[in-house]
Image: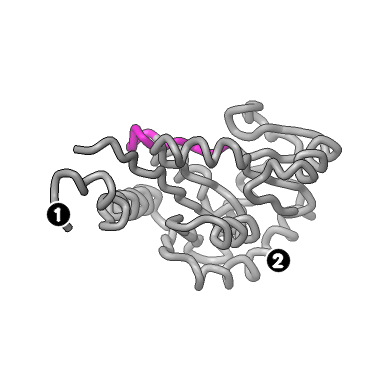
Amino acid sequence: MNSTKREGVLYVISAPSGAGKTTLCKEIIDIFPNLRHSVSYTTRTPRNGEVHGRDYFFVGKEEFSRMVEAGEFAEWAEVHGNFYGTSLAVLKECRSQGIDLILDIDCQGASQLKSRFEGGVYIFVLPPSIAELRRRLDNRSSDSQEVIERRIKNASGEIKEARWYDYIIVNDKFEVAVEQLKSVLIAEQCRAFRLLGSLSSTFEF
């Protein structure tokens, strides 16, 4: 086997708020040892139980603006009145070291990444219905009714973006959705174009 490093894969997951993408991401991290969660920067207030540096890097709007001006984000967007962004330095370092990254980001950010980086895998998570999405948001008890209504309203527009993603997973039964996401990652690791470089000294293609 030659020393050509396999480039880390970007798995980009988007969904309407409340569809369960964050929980899916956390679950799948424990299954793949070479997979890491990309921790985004955000200007929103931490929810109960969220930890700075683990769930998000929580920063003020001034610091976020400075990072934007300095070109420190691979992508960034305003979502539901708050700003989110992915560190460009971390993304490049992980890819160069052959570390796979899973990014839990919105459609705007996913579109930016798709235009900037080749070989990414784009996965959209849907709730089984809008009614179920509302129920999950209500049960989360972390947002005001005004915020919930805004998220429901935005969900219809976000769902329309699913058509350009590579895969769609309907998160009805969580254990089934986990298995489907797991299958996507396993299949993508076996894609020929990802393996040819590291296998070229062993086989003639």
In the picture, measured across the screen, residue 13 lies left or right of residue 97, that is right
Residue that carries the numbered disc 1 in the rendered image: 204
- Residue at position x 42%, y 35% in the image: 97
Q: Quadrant of the N terminus?
A: top left
37 is within the stretch colored magenta? yes
- Residue at position x 67%, y 32% in the image: 57
20 is within the stretch colored magenta? no
Packing grade of label 1 (10 A; few <14, some 14-19, many >=20) is few
Above or below for 173 versus 93: below
In what element is the residue under mark 2? helix
Residue 76: % across, % down: 69, 50
In the picture, measured across the screen, residue 77 lies left or right of residue 65, that is left
Query: Between residues 135 and 44, which one lies in front from this camera angle?
Result: 44
Residue 63: % across, % down: 81, 35
Above or below for 104 versus 36: below
Which is the main secondary structure of the residues drawn in magenta? loop
Query: Between residues 38 and 48, which one lies in front from this camera angle?
Result: 38
Hey, what amino acid is under mark 1? Glu
Alpha-carbon span between mark 1 and mark 2: 54 Å
Residue that carries the numbered disc 2 in the rendered image: 153
Q: Earlier in the sequence, mark 1 or mark 2?
A: 2
Residue extending farthest left:
203
In the picture, measured across the screen, residue 124 lies left or right of residue 202, that is right
